[in-house]
Amino acid sequence: MRDRRLTEQRNPNSQRIDELDPLGIVDLINAEDRGVAEAVGQERQSIAAALELAEAAFRAGGRLVYVGAGTSGRLGVLDAAEMPPTYGTDPEMVRGVIAGGYDALVRSQEGAEDAPEDGAAEMDRIEIGPKDFVLGIATSGTTPFVHGALQRAKELGARTGFLLCTHPTEALLDAHDVVIAPLVGPEVITGSTRMKAGTATKLVLNTITTGAMVRMGKVYGNLMVDLQVTCDKLRDRGERMLEEMLAIDRASASELLERAGGHVKTALVMGRLGLDPEAALRHLEEVGGVVARVVGETKP
């Protein structure tokens, strides 16, 4: 019987891909990839709902936790890992849980996804609670590890969501606070969900965390002002932002950033209002970290 999951169906456009030359393969894959962003756009309302759940979790002192296996799990861990250097967040604020643990990040642990009890145990291990939002990622919609984790997260009082790339069942829609289902269609290589489904997953996760961080005041205009200088690249970026926003030279920007402990947002408030680091931080805390509420809106 034909598999009902879109992620397992054969793509009629690629059934003779093995007969193509290199350019033909590239063109075929590119043609299939063009529909991914549109499929994600069809889920805009659900993605926005997930963004709101993430923001609510953060404001309550909770976390956004991704749970997945294989490519889905790796993408969740990747998105979580990129939050601290990009937005200066605590590493616990966004977390990724992958079936098979750390080893599965660099070497496939296929059997690890088959045990729902292991997913549930992970929720207990990281102490999921009512303040958290747990988003399960399983492009096929059927990964037992993910379902086990989400069931346990619900029992522990967390809000839950599900991201998949096939048609969700009524039971799945009823079970979770939000379900996101970008229907990217069958893969170029049957069942290879690291391709279109993986790309769609990356787009969705990027949008949720970026949007939530904007809402949390970690962006001023479209600048990542809450970044913490941890390397030469980020120092250069931070100094350039201060040059532009404060109309100062590079040496002054560097000195200001040093006084702010490498925190661009604090340096911006210090420079705009003539404050010391402690006073700048106090002003930011009073307005929930939203820079525009302290120094005014950015100018185009």
Image (cartoon, rainbow, N blue to C red):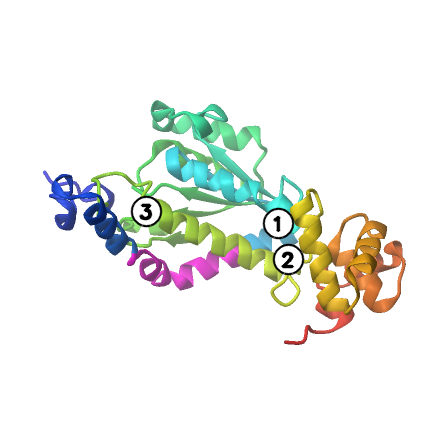
- Kind of element beneath mark 1: helix
Q: Tell me: 33 left or right of 155.
A: left
| Residue at mark 3 | 197
* Picture residue at 68% right of the left edge, 58% below the top: 225
Q: Nearer the viewer, mark 3 or mark 2?
A: 2
Residue 259 in sight here = yes
For badge 1, the amino acid type reads Thr
Lower position in the chain sequence, tag 3 or tag 1: 1
Pointer 1 with pointer 2, Cβ within 8 A: yes
* Picture residue at 31% right of the left edge, 42% below the top: 141
For badge 3, the amino acid type reads Ala
Lower position in the chain sequence, tag 3 or tag 2: 3
For badge 2, the amino acid type reads Met
Q: Tell me: 229 left or right of 280.
A: left
Q: Quadrant of the C terminus?
A: bottom right
Q: Looking at the image, how many numbered discs can be counted on the residues?
A: 3
